[in-house]
């Protein structure tokens, strides 16, 4: 039973992911006074790309070919095991350190693929991505760690469950510090403004897009889909960690349906909020980034200290 | 002897094989490596089997009072010895197999008579250190290990000028470390007895201040051997300049004996001491981890990068040992046991992946003649198997799932999550520890992406890299076995839990609170749980399924040149190099690294507005070395110069010295 639920949760995240991107694009277009595409546009783009043949650069090797499947697989594993719809059974069994590690594995696969193309752009994007990841991953780990000390476990399912059953735990100084740190880390990890601009292809600023420039057809579809899933996953985790209500704490059909609806609402709501925020922000200069990321790292450290000292 | 004695037999076999291997080095150059290598591997297997026997709970003791003058030789093996015997034996086995292909049959470099003669002595003395059971025996084995490794570092001194300064640094640091261990242990032996059993019995009654003194002296020496910052400057030099199988033995096995010494003296002989001892150890660990990885990420030299990563991993191990001590002294025996288990497991994991990575680096150096990452590239086509093995090692070293490095870091993070009610020190220390481990892991990932990505992928950046060819099959076999070892530890870390429990029992600690079944590691009493085997299966299976599905359903792949702006083919000069790759991180850590840059712009003769050429030179010096060691070396040099004036070659002056000395001795004899 819990396996079926986990598979369903994974499929839900996979189906929801392009819509999340669609919502951010549509909200942004509306606020900027453009017509923009519809919510389902990313799905149509994916369908188009999946029909086209993939093209490899002449100098690229195995790492270029392996990156899109690795990116997809790591996103699906997290969607399968982390508590999105339910905290019970396989679907809520993920350990937070493992989740951070598995997501990082995907980042690394794409960074190596960027280098494997042998182009200047690929190397540039890869280099910038790893510099950012080197600071973001610790922040991600540390801020979720701050939330885990109050529960005494690194199991994401138990952390979310504890929040859902005892709302007073969610509104503490530790949580607020962790929220700030985690928020910045999620923006950086998913390549959103002010860290990276997903709609730019300017060499001065591009990070994520530079690594994927040489991908085409099916490969590109996988990379885009997986990136959308990573955004959905991180927004879903952010939602469930700080607004845990609605997540199913038992495996009954009614609860699960409610959990699924709650997840969709949380993720799309956060995506709309993200897009609205982006309209008012400019991208930071690449070399101002360390200050932002070091700041979020410091916030996360404060959150962990607060959680052990105030506990 | 009435019953069969497996540990004694294994050690006797090991010594016999080592001696035979050394003797085989005297044969003609062509067959030398083919005999020494297998014999060395066999001696390693014997050592590892002895370790397994010791880990199964057997104890063994041998007293040879006639072997050394005055003190004799005392050997014994318990589970703690067994763990390190197993580790060193396994690395020795792999190094033996690797030597067959690596040591050329021309009789030069690693294939030379001296190098092959000393190599089995080095591994043999390393394997004797953990079974030494008295202060004199321990010191003799320790020094033998230091001297033989020094000779091996010098192997290629005729080929490269940098080898000699590296060997001098190594000799100076290792001897200075030996002196502190010597003073500490002789002080201990003087007050508490020479053999370890007597020390164990009498040390609890000795004054706490003196024990702290012994501990600090020994810690200094052991940390220097382990390459902990700031006692590390020998390590990036010696590891980089030694032949690669020696680098692997030093980095994977020898530095771990520093950790062994710390555990043996700190926990076993001195009985654990007080909290601040272990706070010092944890601080050593934290500084080593951070400084090591920041230096590694900007390193251009592949072996220097791996060497600094050794400092980083030793830092992680020391951090875990330090926290184990802190928890143990704070009445948290359960978490303390978990922390020490993490330290032991990480020592074994690091031995596995660092052996693999140094072997990979050795293959690259052999094929291309350079260690400079900026000159490499394009090896994934030319050396496909080596690239695959190095990628496996890098995955583990970067502590990414499903690598084996991830398992031990997971355990360590779990221990830091549960400071419990153990006071303010741990309430602040544990989160800081988490931050250190997390930041180290983050930068570590960037380090290994750089090493693999710029060293092995895309187009070659120099003619030697373009002409590289795959290594001989024995070298690949050694790498394959090391990769297999890493894979077993990654997928089924549960297999070593009973052994770790035995080691902790030697220290009179409770077993680690880890319940394992075939697929998952779970902390008893907590809900933390993860299944390394599941992750490995899910990642590998998922990638394969998605890849195959895409190929079956979608259209066939095409190969095209990458977009070159219509301006001819892309050249290797347009690729990112290792230096440019690390530039953003170097900028982030600019204050820590303080790189020296030198930019020369040559202008065109016709007009100053046109630039003809730009030369960019950059060197990232080791700041600790410059600030801490250079002044000391300068003072010592001046003292030496001044000392010369005492011996001007005038006979009258010498007679005056002798007379003065005689008078001083007589006066000293008269005064009671």
Image: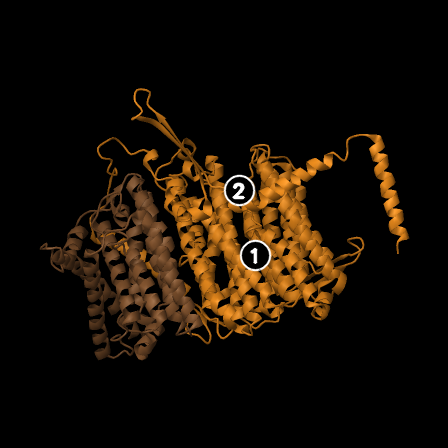
What residue sits 77% from the left and 56% below the top? B72
Lateral position of residue A250 relative to residue B435, left or right:
left
Residue occupying the far left of the picture? A35
Q: Position of residue B287 (x, y in %)?
A: 51, 55
Q: Position of residue A299 (x, y in %)?
A: 37, 62
Disc 1 residue crowd, few under 14, some 14–19, many 20+, Cα 10 Å: many
Q: Looking at the picture, do discs 2 and 1 lie on one chain? A: yes
**Location of mark 2 (residue):** B240
Residue B119 visible? The answer is no
| Front residue of this view, candidates A5 and B480 | A5
Disc 2 residue crowd, few under 14, some 14–19, many 20+, Cα 10 Å: many
| Front residue of this view, candidates A182 and B138 | A182
Q: Position of residue B64 (x, y in %)?
A: 76, 58
Image quadrant of residue B273? bottom right
The orange chain is: B
Image quadrant of residue A20? bottom left
Image quadrant of residue B563? top left
Q: How many marks?
A: 2
Label 2 to label 1, Cα distance in Å? Answer: 22 Å
What residue sits 63% from the left and 35% below the top? B28
Up the image or down, A298 lies above or below B575; here it is below
Q: Colour of chain A?
A: brown
Lateral position of residue A246 relative to residue A143, left or right:
left
Residue B604 visible? The answer is yes
Callout 1 secondary element: helix
**Location of mark 1 (residue):** B87
């Amino acid at each position: 039973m819990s396996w079926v639920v986990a598979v369903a949760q994974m499929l839900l995240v996979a189906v929801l992911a392009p819509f999340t991107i669609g919502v951010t694009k549509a909200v942004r277009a509306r606020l900027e006074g453009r017509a923009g595409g519809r919510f389902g546009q990313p799905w149509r783009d994916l369908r188009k790309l999946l029909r086209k043949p993939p093209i490899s650069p002449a100098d690229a090797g195995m790492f270029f070919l392996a990156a899109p499947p690795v990116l997809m697989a790591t996103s699906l594993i997290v969607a399968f095991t982390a508590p999105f719809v339910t905290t019970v059974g396989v679907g809520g069994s993920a350990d937070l350190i493992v989740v951070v590690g598995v997501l990082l594995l995907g980042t690394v696969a794409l960074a190596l693929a960027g280098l494997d193309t042998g182009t200047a752009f690929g190397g540039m994007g890869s280099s910038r991505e790893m510099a950012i990841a080197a600071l973001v991953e610790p922040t991600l780990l540390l801020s979720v760690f701050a939330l885990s000390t109050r529960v005494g476990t690194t199991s994401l399912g138990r952390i979310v469950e504890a929040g859902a059953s005892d709302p007073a735990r969610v509104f503490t100084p530790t949580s607020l510090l962790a929220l700030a740190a985690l928020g910045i880390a999620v923006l950086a990890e998913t390549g959103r403004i002010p860290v990276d601009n997903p709609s730019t292809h300017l060499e001065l600023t591009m990070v994520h897009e530079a690594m994927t420039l040489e991908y085409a057809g099916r490969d590109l579809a996988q990379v885009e889909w997986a990136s959308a899933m990573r955004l959905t996953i991180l927004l879903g985790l952010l939602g469930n960690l700080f607004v845990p209500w609605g997540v199913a704490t038992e495996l009954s059909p009614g609860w699960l349906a409610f959990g699924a609806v709650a997840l969709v609402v949380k993720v799309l709501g956060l995506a709309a909020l993200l897009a609205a925020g982006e309209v008012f922000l400019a991208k930071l200069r690449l070399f101002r980034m360390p200050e932002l990321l070091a700041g979020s790292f410091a916030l996360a450290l404060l959150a962990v200290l607060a959680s052990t000292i105030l506990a | 002897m009435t019953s069969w004695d497996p540990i004694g037999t294994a050690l006797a076999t090991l010594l016999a094989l080592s001696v035979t291997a050394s003797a085989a080095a005297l044969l003609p150059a062509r067959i030398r490596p083919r005999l020494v290598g297998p014999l060395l591997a066999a001696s390693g297997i014997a050592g590892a089997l002895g370790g397994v026997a010791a880990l199964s709970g057997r104890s063994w003791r041998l007293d040879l009072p006639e072997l050394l003058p005055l003190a004799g030789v005392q050997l014994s093996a318990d589970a703690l010895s067994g763990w390190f015997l197993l580790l060193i034996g396994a690395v020795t086995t792999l190094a033996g197999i690797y030597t067959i292909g690596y040591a050329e049959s021309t009789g030069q470099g690693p294939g030379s008579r001296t190098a092959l003669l000393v190599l089995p002595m080095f591994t043999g003395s390393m394997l004797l250190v953990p079974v030494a059971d008295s202060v004199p025996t321990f010191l003799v084995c320790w020094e033998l290990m230091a001297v033989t490794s020094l000779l091996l570092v010098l192997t290629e001194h005729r080929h490269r000028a940098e080898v000699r300064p590296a060997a001098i640094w190594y000799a100076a640091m290792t001897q200075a470390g030996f002196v502190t261990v010597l003073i500490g242990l002789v002080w201990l032996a003087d007050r508490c007895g020479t053999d370890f059993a007597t020390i164990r019995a009498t040390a609890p009654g000795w004054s706490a201040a003196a024990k702290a003194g012994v501990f600090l002296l020994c810690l200094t020496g052991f940390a220097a051997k382990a390459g902990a910052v700031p006692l590390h400057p020998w390590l990036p030099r010696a590891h980089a300049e030694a032949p690669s199988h020696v680098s692997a033995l030093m980095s994977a096995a020898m530095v771990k004996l520093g950790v062994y010494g710390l555990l043996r003296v700190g926990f076993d002989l001195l009985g654990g001491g007080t909290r601040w001892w272990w706070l010092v150890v944890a601080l050593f660990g934290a500084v080593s981890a951070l400084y090591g990885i920041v230096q590694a990420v900007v390193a251009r030299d592949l072996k220097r990068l791996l060497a600094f990563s050794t400092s980083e991993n030793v830092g992680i191990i020391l951090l875990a040992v330090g926290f184990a001590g802190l928890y143990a002294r704070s009445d948290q025996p359960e978490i303390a046991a978990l922390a020490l288990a993490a330290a032991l497991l990480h020592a074994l994991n690091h031995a596995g992946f660092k052996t693999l990575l140094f072997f990979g680096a050795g293959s690259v150096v052999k094929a291309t003649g350079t260690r400079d990452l900026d000159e490499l590239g394009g090896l994934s086509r030319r050396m496909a198997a080596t690239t695959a093995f190095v990628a496996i090692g890098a995955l583990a070293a970067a502590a990414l799932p499903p690598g084996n490095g991830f398992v031990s870091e997971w355990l360590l993070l779990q221990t830091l999550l549960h400071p419990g009610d153990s006071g303010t020190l741990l309430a602040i220390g544990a989160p800081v520890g988490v931050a250190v481990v997390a930041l180290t892991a983050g930068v570590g990932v960037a380090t290994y992406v750089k090493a693999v990505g710029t060293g092995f992928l895309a187009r070659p950046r120099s003619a030697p890299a373009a002409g590289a060819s795959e290594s001989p099959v024995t070298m690949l076999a050694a790498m394959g076995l090391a990769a297999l070892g890493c894979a077993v530890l990654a997928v089924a870390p549960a297999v070593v839990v009973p052994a770790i429990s035995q080691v902790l029992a030697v220290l009179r600690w409770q077993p680690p609170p880890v319940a394992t079944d075939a697929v998952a590691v779970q902390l008893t009493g907590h809900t933390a749980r993860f299944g390394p085997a599941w992750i490995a299966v899910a990642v590998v299976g998922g990638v394969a399924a998605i890849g195959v599905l895409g190929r079956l359903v979608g259209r066939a792949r095409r190969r095209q040149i990458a977009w070159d702006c219509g301006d001819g083919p892309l050249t290797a000069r347009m690729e990112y190099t290792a230096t440019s790759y690390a530039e953003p991180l170097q900028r982030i850590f600019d204050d820590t690294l303080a790189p020296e840059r030198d930019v020369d712009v040559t202008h065109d003769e016709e007009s100053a507005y046109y630039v003809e050429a730009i030369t960019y030179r950059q060197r990232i010096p080791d700041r600790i070395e410059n600030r801490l060691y250079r002044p000391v070396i300068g003072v010592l040099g001046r003292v030496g110069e001044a000392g010369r004036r005492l011996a001007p070659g005038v006979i009258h002056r010498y007679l005056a010295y002798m007379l003065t000395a005689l008078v001083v001795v007589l006066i000293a004899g008269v005064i009671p």
